[in-house]
Image: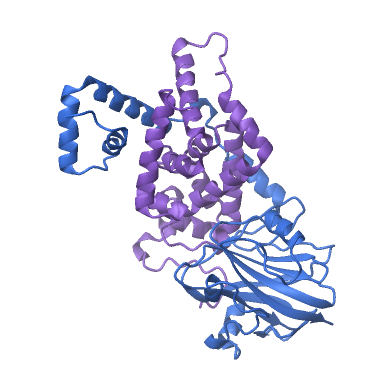
Amino acid sequence: MPSSDNIIDFSGKPSASPGSRPLQDLEDDELMLMTRGGVEAAFDIIARRYQQVLFRVASRVLGQTILAEDAIQNTFLALYNAVGSYEPRGRFKQFLFQILINECRIIMRSAGRFKKLREELAAVVQIKPGMPDEDILEREKNKEVNRALSRLGFKLRIVVVLRFAGGLSYSEIGQALKIPVGTVKSRLNTGIVKMRKIVKGKSP
Amino acid sequence: MKCISPKDLAAYLVGEVTRSQAEDIEEHLASCGSCRKELEGLREMVARIKKPADPAEERDHLPDIRRRIKAGDAGHLPGRRKWPVVAGAIALLAILAAAVYLLLDPGAAEDEFRVKSDQPPATQQDRWAGIRAFSVGAAGTPATLEDVHHESDSLVFTYTNLGENPYDFLMIFAVDGKGRVYWFHPAYTRTGEDPQSIGISKGAERIELREKVRHEYPEGKLWIYGLFTNEPMRVSSIEKLLETTAPGERIPLPGSAQHILATEVKP
């Protein structure tokens, strides 16, 4: 048992003392411990390191930018609140994505918002005046992908999105979702096949 | 050779085929325009998921996050959880090295792990996850919480998280006879905030949560819940479930382990 509060223990990494390196070069676990120690800038580095990938995942899972923004801000607030109890075991990414997934679930559970989300996904692509043809086509295709994702069901959708938009490995996905790697692979395969069918218009 | 099934094509795309399967697929692709087109369609679809939905909408959220942290708790120190003001009655938060005392606690024998629960473990999972509460009086020495909790005393906790399927998250809170809820972990300081469960260590025994907390409770029965889950839970969702749960009863939350300690608050 530790005998005092908030000990920042970098034992095992004597040559990599965080004090001797710029914050940007520190590992996630080290940054979390530094945040716990009161170095607020360490938390900023974590937020900037992960905000884009979290946004990509959340926007594909939720289908709406505004909901994705809610999800990632809530995720970082929850992370900040968890700093004191965080266990640095080299699984920061899985821990962070677990929080994000939970935030996405909370947002989706809100029935009104979910309905709005489905309506949004079904809506016509927004075209601004003077928008180049390529951009219009790009938006059409994006909408198509989001529509297919929204029809997958959460279990398949989250695996597909974590793998491709989040860039997580099979084992990281398994840990974040608490499912075996074999299940991750089979859900990914089923997800891809179903999406393709939807995109090709073979499935409603 | 007949055309490749969508399932096999998807497996080939993500590299989940054996070398010989890959060779068969490639041989077929060389002579089948329809399968090549199908593979190209899959590749394009996956590439699209990898790209941002709308790059123009990717922005820096840090200023908003910082603003929300500040608005939620201006004086918050990371790593030190916060405690609710229940009817203006929060009394004391003292972060001390309680660990030193817990080490010396004579009541902390391993086989006493569940001695304070007023219920037998309801599920097999409950058997392996639990909390211990220690009351800290004026002398500052923690002692295992007994049937009586003196209202001037503070509480500190340890948790144990063993078994084949240990949990990831924990909440500790108390409910009085009138159903009022007092939060320990996570802290809950302001109306409108909605913090979630704290992350815990797996396969761990008697891990301390160092903060010492005192609430003001009315005299009478008090139940302290240790709620172990695999998903982080929101304070608001638990309070909602508690509205329909009699004080001291198990919360209807499938997949959770619950350890409920009963005590009585006296002056």
Q: Is residue B235 visible?
A: yes
> What color does chain A have in the rendering?
purple
For the view shown, which residue lies furthest in the bottom direction?
B106
Residue A67 is situated, as x and y percent measured from the top left of the image, at 61, 36
Query: Which residue is drawn at the image coordinates 54% and 28% (left, top)?
Result: B57
Q: Position of residue B187 (x, y in %)?
A: 68, 62
Q: Where is residue B173 in the image (x, y as percent from the top left)?
A: 69, 67
Q: In this view, does B74 lie above or below B40?
A: below
Q: Which residue is drawn at 48% across and 39% down?
A: A57
Residue B210 in the image: state x and y as whole percent: 61, 72
User: What number of labels is visible?
Assistant: 0
Q: The blue chain is which one?
A: B
Q: Is residue B114 above or below residue A127?
A: below
Tell me: B5 left or right of B129. left
Query: Height in image: B237 above or below A110?
Result: below
* Residue B75 in which image quadrant: bottom right
Q: Residue at the front extreme? A: B2
- Can residue B160 be seen here? The reply is no
The figure's colour scheme reads by chain
- The front one of B218 and A179 is A179
Residue B144, by quadrant, is: bottom right
Report the front residue among B55 and A117.
A117
Q: Kindly identify the residue that appears in the image at 34 percent across and 29 percent down.
A: B42
Instruction: Give the residue drawn at x 75%, y 66%.
Output: B182
Left or right of residue A166: residue A107: right
* Left or right: B37 as drawn, with respect to A3: left
Of residues B59 and A22, which is closer to you in this image? Answer: B59
